[in-house]
Amino acid sequence: MRYYDEKHETMSRDEMTALQSARLVDVVKRMYEGAPYYRAKMDAIGLLPGDIKGIEDIDKLPFTTKADLRANYPFGCFALPKSEISRVHASSGTTGKLTVVGLTNRDIDDWAECAARALVMAGCDKNDIVHVSYGYGLFTGGLGLHYGSEKLGSMTVPASAGNTMRQITLIKDFGATALACTPSYAMVIGEEIEKMGLSLSEFKLKRGIFGAEPWSEDMKREIERKLGITAYDIYGLSEISGPGVAMSCGGDWGLHVMEDYFYPEIVDPDTLKPVPDKTDGELVFTTLRKQGMPLIRYRTRDISALNHDACSCGRTLCRMKRVSGRTDDMLIIRGVNVFPSQIESVLMNIKEIVGSHYQIIVDRQNNLDTMEIQVELAPAVFSDEIRKVEEIRRRIEHDMMGNLGVGAKITLVSPDSLPLSTGKTVRIIDKRAKQ
């Protein structure tokens, strides 16, 4: 099975442009009529839906940002009444409030279609057994690959995340041929298989579909070695769609964007002007078919590039470069979005015992993301007995886990021991980029 939807995956550029143009005109009209926040953005610049004749007019439209989603929490960005929304998903936001996404039944079906295409790009078909170890729930990873696998007709194992020993047993006993999870969790599974003394010949795994966090080519090769598979990169984000927005085909340049559903742009993050093909900039998406919560020119803050050259796989869908960084201060820790402002919010709630200075140190140990938060204690507390200091540490650790959804090591340090800056304070030290 080479394609899931050959017609749309191999369209000529003229055909794709015509389809994108028709869908853009439709989505702008629906947004203007159904989403007051976006109508206000258009009215502010004197733009009417009729001014958009096709995809060539997209740069007339205003950008949408995460700040828009925050300002309209929880349901203010929906373009339809709540009675027509079938499901919500959500991801972390900078204020601790979730970024909420609403989907109709058709949106869910479209998402499954894109995820099914992605699985086929990785070589899957209905004879595969797909073991899904992404988290299920408000996070889009698990259900996205689950519905895609079912749409394809593959046997689907909804294992979710955690309990690695049980995961390995299921992968082995059920004869899974494809593994879907974060790359860091794939490494954990591979390392546990080695520790258990199991031979890869006891498994039937052939391929892995990995995403939701940054990973390097070196890590890709190590995963392939440890699991005896071919690894593929999948991209998605809750606001636009979960996994299946783009997918690697095994070629040597980037991930194919499902551009009949999502129109990609790359802009200079400072000027917001478009940049040429194969030039790094900020990735911007417009949803072309979504009903529940369409987004127009949504600034993802991800750094990427586009390539419209022909691909050896035969697909004409443009490709996006693997995301290399971000234009904001968001961190992705084991697939979870973490903002320094969330950490600060937790610390400020116990400001009577904690100083105002902190630093976040992110690293990758044994191919798993780690996060340490160093916090200065207030002078009066630092000299207190060890038992009380340890109680404070445990309290911060507990509150961080509850607020962030991911564990962090808390290190309490003496007053004035963290470096000060006369300019912008350096809150984050990310050692992963140096590996």
Image (cartoon, grey):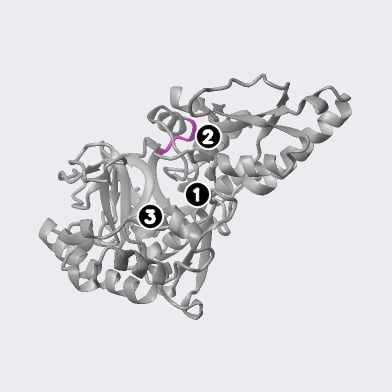
Q: Hey, what amino acid is under mark 3?
A: Gly
Q: CA distance from mark 1 to mark 3?
A: 21 Å
Identify the mark at residue 187; answer none if there is no mark.
2
- Residue 98 included in the magenta stretch of the image: no
Q: Amino acid at mark 2?
A: Met
In this figure, which residue is indicated by the disc labeled 3?
A: 244
Q: Is residue 308 visible?
A: yes
First-in-chain label (1 vs 3)? 1
Q: Residue at x 15, y 59 (%)?
A: 56
Residue placed under numbered mark 1 in the picture: 176
Q: In the shown orientation, is residue 27 left or right of residue 224? A: left
> Which is nearer the eye, 20 or 384?
384
Range of magenta residues: 226-230
Percent of width and height locating residue 363: 55, 27
Q: What number is the disc on residue 22?
A: none
**Element at badge 3?**
strand
Task: Tell me: 64 left or right of 23.
Answer: right
Q: Nearer the viewer, mark 3 or mark 2?
A: 3
Q: Rate crowding at label 2 as few (under 14), some (14 to 19) or many (20 or more) other CA atoms within 10 Å.
A: many
- Residue at point 33%, 57% (across, down): 117
